[in-house]
Image (spheres, rainbow, N blue to C red):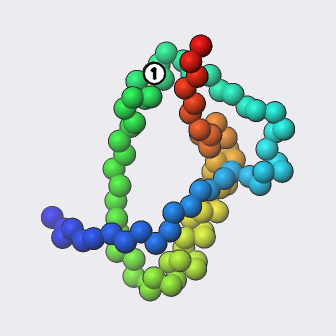
Amino acid sequence: MAKLSKLKVIEQCQVSPLPKSSFPQTSYHLHLTFLDIPWLFFSPSQPLFFYEFPYPSSHFTSITLPNLKHSLSLTLQHFYPFAGIVLVVDY
């Protein structure tokens, strides 16, 4: 088993799918079904893997991290509903 090491958070950010000018002017609502109810209480767990990065930290923050953000931004364009926020409204 690999040795566990401490993690250092270097940045927290929010990645949006498009610039705000490209969003629809009206609110977009995607109503959940009864099959979605369990996920409101229990988030799905996903494995998270860490790999050794053979380059200096400056390379990661200046090249790799912006590429990851850009890739996520492009992906969220195709999965627009996943880029939103789940709101619970009492009726």
At 38% from the left and 37% from the top, the residue drawn is 44
Q: Classify 10 Å Cα crowding around label 1: few (below 14), some (14-19), many (20 and above).
A: few
Q: On the rendered image, what quadrant is the N terminus found in?
A: bottom left
Query: Tag count in the figure?
Result: 1
At 33% from the left and 50% from the top, the residue drawn is 47
Q: In the figure, is residue 28 to the left or right of 53?
A: right
Question: What SS does tag 1 mark?
Answer: helix
The x and y percentages for residue 9 are 42, 69
Between 75 and 62, which is closer to the camera in this rendering?
62
At 49% from the left and 15% from the top, the residue drawn is 34
The x and y percentages for residue 85 are 59, 38
- Above or below residue 46? Residue 88 is above
Q: Which quarter of the picture shows residue 48?
A: bottom left
Between 37 and 46, which is closer to the camera in this rendering?
37
Which residue has dot 1 on it?
Answer: 37
Q: On the rendered image, what quadrant is the C terminus found in?
A: top right
Q: In the figure, is residue 76 to the left or right of 48?
A: right
Outermost residue toward the left in this view: 1
Outermost residue toward the front in this view: 90
Q: Which quarter of the picture shows residue 39?
A: top left
At 78% from the left and 51% from the top, the residue drawn is 20
Between 23 and 79, which is closer to the camera in this rendering?
23
Q: Which quarter of the picture shows residue 19?
A: bottom right
Q: In the figure, is residue 90 to the left or right of 30?
A: left
The x and y percentages for residue 21 are 83, 50
- Above or below residue 1? Residue 57 is below
User: Mark 1 belongs to which amino acid?
Assistant: Ile
